[in-house]
Amino acid sequence: MSTTVKTKEDGQIQHFTHKHPLQLVDLNKEQDEVFCSICQKLCSDVVYGCRKCNFFLHHSCMDIPRVINQHQFHSEHSLVLLTDPSYECQGCDKHCSGLAYTCGQCDFQLDVKCAFLPTADCEVAEWIQRFSHQHSLQLIDPNKEEDEVHCSICRKLCSDFIYGCKKCNFFLHHSCMDIPREINQHLFHPNHSLVLFTKSSYKCKGCDKDCSGLAYKCQACLFELDVECALLPAANCEGAKWIKHVYHHHPLELCDIEDGHEAHCWACRESSQGRHFVCHRCNFFLHQSCAIDLLPQTIQDHPFHPKHCLKIESYNEESFDCRACGKYDSYDSNVLGYCCVDCPDFKFHLDCSKLIPSIKYGSHRHLFTLFQKRGYPGSCLICKDNCESFFLRCVSCDITLHLQCHQLAPKTLKHKHLRHSLFLTKSPLDSDLEYYGHRGEYYCDFCELPRPAEDPVYYCKECDLSADIRCFISQVLLSVTVEEHSEVGEDKDDNFREGKSFTTDPKVVKFDEEIEELASELEHKELRRRKLKAQVEGLQSEIEELSNGSNELEWRIKGLERDRLSYFAYRTSRVQS
């Protein structure tokens, strides 16, 4: 026997749904039809009932729960089964009497039929309940309706059987009923969960439009998204016109950039036309290829900044100061970059993050990285001249060298189509000044592309040919990346011997000792910082766990208080009767 039923010595039972004891009734001996007071369906054979109150129960209906938690129509509070002489069911809007699932905190009541309607997961039923709407939904043939019917989720025309509430003009495709009730870590609002609510009016934070109806809402913030923005596909979804993307907090539209309208991609910073994903509100552009070719949202142990975590951030500033390549350009005001979580001033371009330090210089303790871009504002540590392009950088120590100033960079090069050698020479040449003047528009005689006027070139005096370093970059890199102790010629051996004598120089030894001492102190402080940070994070996690536990206990206490009050009302009514 169910715990909701108590059996008396005379065979009668006490059920919480009725104030009087119930006894077995043989309906075969009854003249009038008898209906179950819970499901309202016809009773047959033997049932439990109270003839005085005309109250009868199917055996199968006696296990009805006294309390329902998180009902689809009213998930905020628990619903308790009580008897009410007159009430309006919030599920079907009908005036009812008798048993009702009642919220003790709100003016909300459901009749038993609406409380136990099947869900959309069940087989096709005439009526269902769904958390996306506060009323019961009826199976409807839209082809028999006078007006066109549109789905309240996807806004598209409905043509096949659907579920809907005609009173609220709310309709759902079968495929749209599977939308989630809650979304965790949404790209537009990753810090808190978004829960589906019905609102009379709100402004969507995704598309900035005034909306009404269903909204995904953050309980902690004034943040709301319409369903369309909340459920946008990702960039790799074929044929998507609108997408959500990890690089931006608004929906992006796929557009063709017309001729004459220049756009800079925030990811690669290249200027181009063609197909882009665009946020018109923020003037945000993203190549279709850059949108799909995703870089990790966070990076640990990056060689440019190994001690801290880096994450992708969008910047809309007057300029962007990249700590990797050193570029500081005003047109980079709209850019995506990696930023250190602990050092906000340390940031660098996404494309710079792909570079790997691989070039050794002398006895320097870090490897250098080759940057093949123009516009570096600093000067070379060796020759003191400006570094216009093709430079080496130790990002950790903020040291920059010309590629050609590397001790192993070749001073002469051979070319298979030239009889003479090419010599590394300062620019501009006398012949350049003669031919080009002082306009600064110099060109490489090999690739015929513009080259920086101040950058050294490989020059053949006999043929009067000058070559930009980029045309011989593979040969130059092969020279500078050869290990210094390898036997590849007398020059390399001389460099190696010179390097060994350099490291034993007393002044250099003193530098190394001081560097090692400071590095050890830095490592000690960094370990201490990480330990303290871990303790803080642990305490925050414990605080959150305790807060969740307190909320759960508070909810359980409230539920017991409601049950206690319901039982008190029941006992009082028994005494009075």
Image (tube, grey):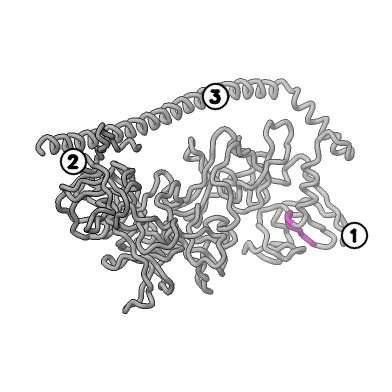
Q: Residue at x 29, y 57 (%)?
A: 42
Element under label 1? loop
Query: Residue 419: which numbered mark, if any?
Result: 1
Q: Is residue 467 magenta?
A: yes
Residue 461 % position (x, y): 82, 58
Q: Alpha carbon of mark 1 to alpha carbon of mark 3: how far?
A: 60 Å
Nearer-N-terminus badge (1/2): 2
Residue labelled with disc 2: 19
Kindly identify the amino acid type of the residue bearing the numbered disc 2. Answer: Lys
Give the total of numbered labels: 3
Disc 3 to disc 2, how far (Cα)?
A: 70 Å
Q: Secondary structure at mark 3?
A: helix
> Please, what secondary structure does the residue beneath circle 2 have?
loop
Q: Is residue 515 left or right of residue 336?
A: right
Q: Residue furthest front?
A: 29
Gap between marks 1 and 2 measured at Cα: 113 Å
**x 18%, y 58%: residue:** 95
Q: Quadrant of the C terminus?
A: top left
* Range drawn in magenta: 465-470
Please tell me whether residue 194 belongs to the stretch shown in magenta.
no
Q: Is residue 359 above or below residue 121?
A: above
Indicate the position of residue 307 as horizontal and vertical percent values: 57, 32
Q: Do labels 1 and 2 touch, CB within 8 Å?
A: no
Which sits in the foreground, 416 or 119?
A: 119
| Residue kind at label 1, given as amino acid type | Arg
Residue 527, numbered label: 3
1 or 2: mark nearer the eye: 2
Q: Is residue 432 visible?
A: yes
User: Residue 114 at x, y = what percent?
Assistant: 29, 55
Closer to the chain start, of discs 3 and 2, is 2
Residue type at the position of mark 3:
Leu
